[in-house]
């Protein structure tokens, strides 16, 4: 926790001019204004300026210095935001909330953008994926009067203001990296209603008998799964590919989609194919940030999965209509891509009853005779039908399964510890919350109740299993190396064996999406794909209990594939929202 006091040269200076008085950093985004401990600043209430940058808990520091920054005092702090969704995370919203309250002391706050991490004289800037940096500057009255009023913080619409400012400040970055067409309302905003809006339909996960114990599929579900798989097999193996009606799938949202989003988009396209009686084919030449570069010109699908159709030669797509466009019903070949998903797509002519009376075809549409089994069941059958690993990927999956020692009799807990870029939608859970769930699962497995503090409970569990450690497998998927270290330490404390795919991967927990990090050269696409895909299939096939976050499409994939592979809903816990199976 550090800050610096400096003299404020003149009343008309802008924050941009203030920064220009100092030498521009040459080493990238980590270089900051020289600093001294904030606790040395606090007694000096006469300081003309307090700058808070690059601290571990900026909201705590701001709370401390805000009370000291009164009268003719300027308070400046760096506030992080997500450059793809153009939204603030929880820590940043806490900072903003403190500054909003600080205004009541007589100051007025303004936004300022600067590109400290840019290197104008470097042809390939390694920091081009980073958004312009944002500072909030709270000025006393006489200085506020001369500041640009257009940059005054609009507390009730700050996400909209941020997006407009970013587009004006760096239109090239905005065009290349910003994916949101509107203003995102992240779930964390429910704690900051004075600053931003949150979704109105968020429900927290609550344990049920099914989530605690799981359940086997009913005979009706099992028979229906066989029927749907046969239906898909026949549709995907037409007697004549030259005459077959085709729907070509092109990767959707290619700059942002991860595996969860892309595979669920494919399930929606397959549902439309079944409704329209069309064979679904994948155009592997379509761009996607997660498609590996290959001399063989294979795209993502060719690298990792078996073909989804017996038809091999894609028809020409020049002039081909998208599904749902006027006149498309009579065409032999149609396209399904990002623009298709943005259309108000009507159900095919003979599938009006698939969507529960709705006029628009969406991922919620299910054939009437299967609607009573639920959308999750339907999606699980579709995904299992198309997500068939090729031999190379299957060999990697089996190698990790062997590490779990299936014949040992140890139960397997699968954990998806979602961190990274997901914070723009839902606040990530700290490792301690996952560890608490493991303690509860251990109580059920060992039929023993733990008492006292958490440290006491861990000691009781360790004593209980000391003679047979490792007594349980914990298989983890995460992009956060520090969170993985915490779970590793906890696993050792309770006598568990922890396994991850590619343990030498440092899992840097970047605050940008993995597709963007791949495009920026920060992550290797082949390595990221293999860690994610191998983890997905190992977890779906092997986990007897699953702890995930159902706001994540990847966590939902685990549950859906597990349901299809094992004809049961496995016991599960979501660290955020529920997902009905």
Image (spheres, rainbow, N blue to C red):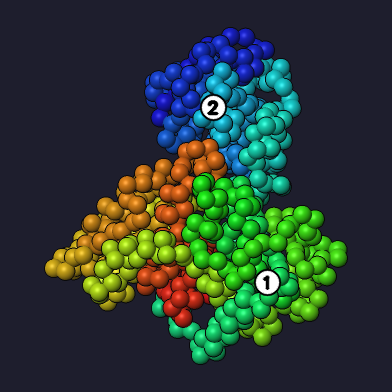
Mark nearest the camera among 2 and 1 is 1
Q: Which residue, given by chain and number where applicable, does mark 1 sit on?
A: 241
Extreme residue in the right direction: 327
Closest to the observer: 261 or 463?
Answer: 261
Could you tell me residue 459's position as x and y percent? Answer: 20, 60
Closest to the observer: 550 or 512?
Answer: 512
Could you tell me residue 450's position as x and y percent? Answer: 27, 68
Extreme residue in the top direction: 9
**Can residue 376 be seen here?**
no
Tell me the number on the disc at residue 125: 2
Q: Quadrant of residue 531?
A: bottom left
- Classed neighbour count for the residue bearing mark 2: other residues with Cα under 10 Å, few (<14), some (14–19), many (≥20): some
Closest to the observer: 444 or 288?
Answer: 288
**Can residue 121 be seen here?**
yes
Residue at 64% across / 29% down in the picture? 111
The image shows residue 350, relative to residue 85, as above or below, that is below
């Amino acid at each position: 926790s550090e800050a610096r006091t400096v003299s404020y040269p003149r009343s008309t200076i802008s924050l941009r001019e203030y920064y220009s008085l100092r030498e521009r950093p040459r080493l990238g985004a980590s270089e900051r204004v020289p600093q001294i401990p904030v606790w040395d600043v606090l007694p000096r209430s006469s300081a003309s300026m307090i700058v808070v940058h690059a601290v571990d808990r900026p909201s705590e520091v701001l709370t401390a210095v805000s009370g000291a920054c009164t009268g003719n005092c300027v308070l400046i702090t760096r506030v992080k935001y997500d450059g793809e969704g153009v939204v603030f995370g929880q820590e940043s919203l806490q900072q903003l909330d403190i500054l909003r309250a600080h205004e009541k002391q007589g100051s007025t706050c303004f936004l300022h953008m600067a590109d400290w991490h840019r290197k104008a004289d470097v042809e390939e800037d390694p920091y081009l994926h980073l958004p312009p940096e944002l500072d909030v500057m709270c000025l006393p009255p006489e200085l506020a009067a001369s500041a640009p009023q257009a940059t005054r913080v609009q507390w009730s619409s700050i996400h909209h203001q941020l997006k407009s400012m970013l587009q004006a400040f760096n239109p090239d970055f905005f065009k290349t990296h910003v994916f949101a067409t509107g203003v995102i309302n992240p779930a964390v905003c429910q704690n900051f209603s004075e600053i931003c809006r949150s979704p109105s339909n968020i429900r927290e996960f609550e344990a049920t008998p099914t989530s605690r114990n799981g359940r086997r599929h009913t005979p009706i579900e099992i028979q229906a799964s066989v029927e749907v798989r046969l239906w898909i097999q026949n549709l995907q193996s037409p007697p004549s590919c030259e005459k077959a009606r085709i729907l070509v799938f092109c990767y959707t949202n290619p700059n942002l989609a991860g595996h969860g989003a892309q595979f669920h988009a494919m399930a929606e396209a397959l549902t439309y194919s079944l409704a329209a009686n069309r064979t679904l084919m994948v155009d592997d030449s379509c761009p996607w940030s997660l498609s590996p570069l290959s001399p063989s010109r294979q795209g993502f699908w060719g690298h990792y999965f078996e073909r989804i159709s017996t038809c091999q030669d894609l028809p020409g797509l020049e002039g081909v209509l998208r599904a749902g466009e006027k006149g498309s019903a009579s065409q032999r070949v149609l396209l399904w891509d990002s623009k298709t998903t943005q259309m108000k797509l009507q159900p095919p002519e003979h599938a009006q009853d698939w969507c529960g009376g709705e006029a628009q075809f969406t991922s919620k549409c299910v054939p009437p005779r299967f609607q009573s089994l639920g959308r999750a069941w339907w999606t699980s059958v579709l995904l299992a039908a198309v997500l068939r690993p090729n031999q190379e990927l299957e060999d990697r999956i089996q190698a990790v399964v062997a590490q779990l020692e299936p014949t040992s009799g140890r139960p397997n807990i699968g954990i998806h510890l979602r961190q990274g870029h997901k914070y723009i939608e839902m606040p990530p859970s700290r490792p301690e919350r996952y560890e608490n769930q493991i303690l509860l699962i251990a109580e059920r497995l060992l039929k023993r109740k733990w008492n006292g503090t958490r440290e006491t409970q861990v000691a009781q569990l360790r004593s209980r299993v000391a003679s047979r450690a490792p007594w349980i497998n914990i298989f983890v998927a995460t992009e956060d190396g520090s969170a993985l270290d915490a779970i590793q330490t906890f696993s050792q404390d309770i006598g568990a064996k922890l396994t991850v795919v590619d343990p030498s991967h440092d899992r840097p927990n970047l605050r940008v999406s993995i597709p963007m990090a791949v495009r920026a050269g920060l992550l290797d696409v082949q390595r990221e794909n293999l860690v994610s895909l191998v983890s997905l299939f190992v977890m779906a096939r092997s986990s007897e209990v699953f702890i995930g976050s159902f706001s994540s499409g990847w966590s939902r994939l685990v549950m859906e594939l597990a349901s299809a592979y094992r004809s049961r809903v496995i016991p599960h816990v979501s660290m955020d929202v529920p997902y009905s199976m």
